[in-house]
Image (cartoon, rainbow, N blue to C red):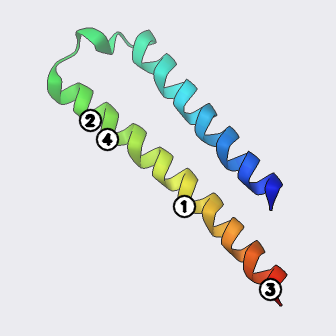
């Protein structure tokens, strides 16, 4: 289970690094507010999907260990 937690942290860091790099490479600092909010929404959604997927694995592992 510890491995899965480390995978979760690692994947969140990778997603954040990709989106931060994309923000600067795309020059979104000069973009309109709507574009920035859309980008932030996409970033949040991707993080949410990653976290939910890995947390599902962690929960399954915990349930498997209880048996």
Crowdedness near tag 3: few (<14), some (14–19) or many (≥20) residues, C-alpha within 10 Å: few
Looking at the rendering, which quadrant does residue 10 occupy? top right
Q: Are marks 4 and 1 in contact (CB under 8 Å)?
A: no
Vertical comparison of 31 with 3: above or below:
above
Mark pair 4, 1: CA separation? 16 Å
* Front tag of 4 and 3: 3
Q: On the rendered image, what quadrant is the C terminus found in?
A: bottom right
Q: Which residue is mark 3?
A: 66
Residue at the spot x=71%, y=76% of the render?
60
Q: Are marks 2 and 4 in contact (CB under 8 Å)?
A: yes
Q: Nearer the viewer, residue 35 or 5?
A: 5
Which label's residue is closer to the chain start, 3 or 2? 2
Q: Secondary structure at mark 1?
A: helix
Mark sitting on residue 38: 2
Crowdedness near tag 4: few (<14), some (14–19) or many (≥20) residues, C-alpha within 10 Å: few
Q: Which residue is mark 1?
A: 52
């Amino acid at each position: 289970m510890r491995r899965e937690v480390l995978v979760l942290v690692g994947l969140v860091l990778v997603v954040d690094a990709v989106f931060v790099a994309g923000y600067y490479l795309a020059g979104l600092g000069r973009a309109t507010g709507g574009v920035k909010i859309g980008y932030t929404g996409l970033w949040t959604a991707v993080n949410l999907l990653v976290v939910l997927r890995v947390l599902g694995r962690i929960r399954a592992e915990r349930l498997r260990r209880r048996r």
